[in-house]
Image (cartoon, rainbow, N blue to C red):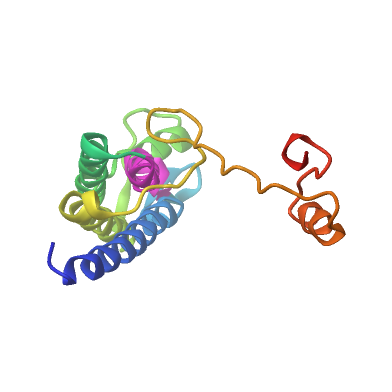
Amino acid sequence: MPPHHPRTARRSVGAALLLGAAGAALVLLSGGRTWSEGSAPAAQGTLAEQASGQDVTALPGALAVVGLAALVAVFAVRGAGRLVVAVLLALSGAGTVAAALVGADDTGALEEKAAKVAGNTQATIGDVTHTAWPWVAVAGGALLFLAGLLAVRYGRRWPTMSGRYERDGTPRPRRPRAAVDPDRPEELWKALDRGEDPTGEAGR
């Protein structure tokens, strides 16, 4: 393997983590902000109504959570499993972008609120305006998608979460304790410092 590959792998890990975390944060943030505004007919004129991203569609937020979980899971699996999770991450980002684009000019949530205010299912919403927050969700989804592409391209070289157990689930062998001479007090104290029992089997 060429010498620049480890450095490229390290850089791709950092970039994917940054892109994925930032993307998910943007999507989740935008979900709680106002996506559209309008005026609904009321008994005494009109009443201003607002619809948040969650009112319009909960799909971008849900996909962002899935993408964030996939980003973490990439480091917990190996081989083909890692590729599958990386693809899931990319698809979550792509789905977030699509869902946010669909909701960017949606008026359904405002119309539902207008119907409740007017007490009439045929009530319409007027003076509708849309904010930039749906496009923030689009940008967040794009970042998640890029993180997924990096995971697909370089994920096989990324490190795996360390643990006590090997891949087959068996515990790693422990290093044998050094023999302790009971006639040498300094060795007894060193064994105690290491958390060993100098009077046990290893010290006999």
- Count of numbered tags: 0
Residue at left 18%, top 53%? 149
Q: Is residue 74 visible?
A: yes
Magenta span: chief secondary structure: helix
Q: Is residue 146 left or right of residue 20?
A: left
Residue at left 81%, top 45%? 198
Q: Quadrant of the N terminus?
A: bottom left
149 w.r.t. 60: above or below: below
Magenta residues (range): 51-76
Q: Residue 164: x percent and y percent?
A: 52, 40
Residue 102 within the magenta-colored segment of the rendering: no
Q: Can you tell which quarter of the image residue 55 is in?
A: top left
23 w.r.t. 57: above or below: below
Residue at left 19%, top 47%? 94
48 w.r.t. 165: above or below: below
Q: Quadrant of the C terminus?
A: top right
